[in-house]
Image (cartoon, grey):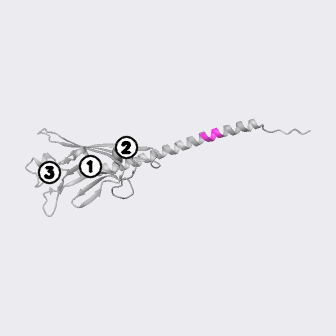
Amino acid sequence: MIQRKGYTLVEVMVSMGILSIISLLGYVAINSSVESAQVTDTKAGVQAGLRDAMNTLVGEVRTAYTNRVIDSDAAPEDVEMITVGEGGTSLVFQVPSVTGESPIPAASSSININWENEDTGGGEANGILDAGEDANDDGALTRRLVRTQDATVEYLGSANNISGVLFTLETNDDDDNPQTTLRIWLEASKRIGGNDGPLVQSVLESTVQLVN
């Protein structure tokens, strides 16, 4: 008599259960690794854009006129000291400009740096383009630094995810060292995987010793 050997139903069910658990754990591990890589790559991109905007901004403002030059005998005509706008999100300044044949720098026309931010959300910034926020009607959430001089409008750096800006001007009243310092704080943020994804944020600060 031939005996047939095989697995019982209980053994099959237990094996399937163990296989399902192993598969689930593997999926969770792979999914977690993919999400971690996405967060790392996104944060690196956010930080790179923030550095680009900061470097461009520092290069623009470093030679801005301060009271050190304005209060001296060498002050150009029609020049005003750098100022920070209400709320600390804008700057107005002038820089030396050599025009024509004269080697003596004159003051440039006023340069305005403003933070253009559509992420209002009724007072709550969320990194999402909500209804009614697309002021420039381009279909994207605009958050960037804008440079305006005369009729020319430019954008500082490539970052369009700047979620926070704060300019602080500190003037040293010491006559022997009339140094003026501009402190710049920038924050950038970006959502991963759509409106329901996690929000990646990065902050960059810089202290600029104004030379004029």
Name the residue that disc number 1 marks: 58
Furthest residue toward right: 1
Real-space Cα separation, disc 3 to disc 1, in angstroms = 19 Å
Q: Is 129 situated left or right of 16 in this image? A: left
Q: Nearer the viewer, residue 101 or 41?
A: 41
At 33% from the left edge and 44% from the top edge, which residue is drawn? 123
Query: Which secondary structure, mark 3?
Result: loop
At 34% from the left edge and 46% from the top edge, which residue is drawn? 122
Badge 2 vs badge 1, beta-carbon distance below 8 Å: no
Nearer to us of marks 3 and 1 is 3
Query: Which secondary structure, mark 1?
Result: helix
Q: Which residues are magenta?
A: 20-24
Q: Is 38 situated left or right of 95 in this image? A: right
- Which label sits on residue 202? 2
Q: Amino acid at mark 2?
A: Ser
Q: Is 130 situated left or right of 65 in this image? A: right
Q: Amino acid at mark 1?
A: Val
Real-space Cα separation, disc 2 to disc 3, in angstroms = 34 Å
